[in-house]
Amino acid sequence: MLKLRQLILLLACAVSSIAYAHNPFEFETPVTPVAEETLHVHDLFLGIIGVLFVLSVMILFYALYKHRKSRGYQPASFTGPHGRKQWLFAILPFLALVFIDFVVMGIPAYHAAVAMANTQEDAQLVIKVTGSQWKWQYEYPDQGLKFYSNLSTPPDELQGRAPKGEHYLLEVDHPLVLPVGEKVRILLASTDVIHAWWVPPFGVKQDAVPGFLRETWVKIDKPGVYRGQCAELCGVGHAYMPIVVEAKNQTDFQQWLAQAKAAQAAEAVASQKSNFTRAELLAMGKKVFDTNCAACHQANGLGIAGVFPPIAAGKPFSATPTLLADLTARGFYENGKIVLGPIKNHLGIVLHGVPGTSMPAFGAQLSDAEIAAVVTYERNSFGNQTGDLVEPTEAKIRRAAP
């Protein structure tokens, strides 16, 4: 029995190796134990299927040739196995499939499933990943570090005005950085709809579900940059949720961690600044808008007809009566066109979102300075010329308001 299993494994590996040599559809090179185990099970299964297919076709053609009509064979009426030989040919394939299913395939698959479920044992680092429309937030709870990772593909490439780069739609402003050789426990959550954190070289694809805390783990074998995507259709900006993980050796990781914490502290201090110039607010506001708002309202501020309202001055917009009534009450819709309402209402929309719509609340994602800057930018761009300069203190006051 052992020799039979070894023969099947050998044939399976041979067929798998031939089928997957230099195949452009091959799995990405695995860099974690889970990915390696998953690829092993996949290739083993593919190899076994290949062997069974070849054997079945050989038997079929042998039977057709051996028992052809020209040699005097007549069709038989077969109602069930009769005799020892027929029973043997009926039972042996069944037993072989049971052996392949529960032994050859079952044991590796069981070990892979157990390994993927073991998220806590020997974990040396915990990362919390939160999905939202349409970005990822990465948090290092024990290190006091938190940041958002946004798509960084240039708008000109998104709009087709420039050639697509090598990593089109797979590049971010702040990648997740992880150490090599450490087991990292990853907790996943969502603030709005279901997302899925998927990095093919890691063999990881785990849903982030609102109201639930899911988990998985990775242990990266070698340094490098690894890319993935949100793998759950989550709205119009689904294609704009790439995942980039940069794996560093322990020394480089600790250096990065220290620098990231220092940068976060400096940013927190800078966000408390109250005397921003007009140029500073507009420059910061454009960056915030391009990163967080352009996916819906578009880079030109025209929005998407009937779905996302334009920001450009005086542009028509059609939507449900409920949404139009809400926008009218806030001073942003009049006589069939989008208009600019009071600053406090504008701040309220950006901070707290619009319930019942896809407009998210950015209060937990952006600082007071960033909120003030993007509102200033919107009120002085896309044909809007209010001249308003919104101070971070105004955003802070409005943040505390219901």
Image (spheres, grey):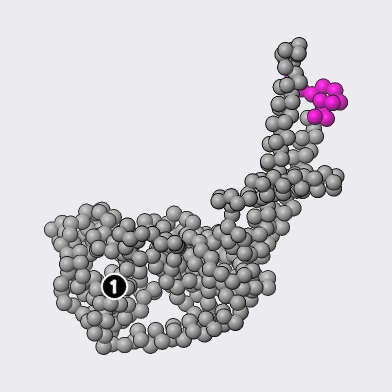
Q: Residue at x 25, y 54 (%)?
A: 305
Instruction: Left or right? Give the position of 105 relative to 395.
Output: right
Q: Residue farthest to the left?
A: 335
Categorize mark 1 by other alpha carbons within 10 Å: few (<14), some (14-19), many (20+): many
Q: Count up the numbered dots.
A: 1
Q: Position of residue 137 (x, y in %)?
A: 46, 70
Q: Residue at x 52, y 81 (%)?
A: 256
The three-letter code of the residue at mark 1 reads Lys
- Is 328 included in the stretch rendered in magenta? no
Q: Position of residue 397 (x, y in %)?
A: 29, 81
Q: Position of residue 195 (x, y in %)?
A: 47, 60
Q: Which residues are magenta?
A: 78-89
Q: Is residue 349 visible?
A: yes
Q: Is residue 10 above or below residue 221?
A: above
Name the residue nearer the viewer: 78 or 349: 78
Instruction: Left or right? Give the position of 78 relative to 223.
Output: right
User: Tag 1, which secondary structure?
Assistant: helix
Q: Quadrant of the C terminus?
A: bottom left
Q: Residue at x 81, y 48 (%)?
A: 6
Q: Residue at x 47, y 77 (%)?
A: 146
- Is 85 included in the stretch rendered in magenta? yes
Q: Is residue 356 visible?
A: no
The residue at which mark 1 appears reads as 286
Instruction: Left or right? Give the position of 236 relative to 224.
Output: left
Quadrant of residue 110 in the image?
A: bottom right
Name the residue nearer the viewer: 246 or 164: 164
Instruction: Left or right? Give the position of 5 relative to 113.
Output: right
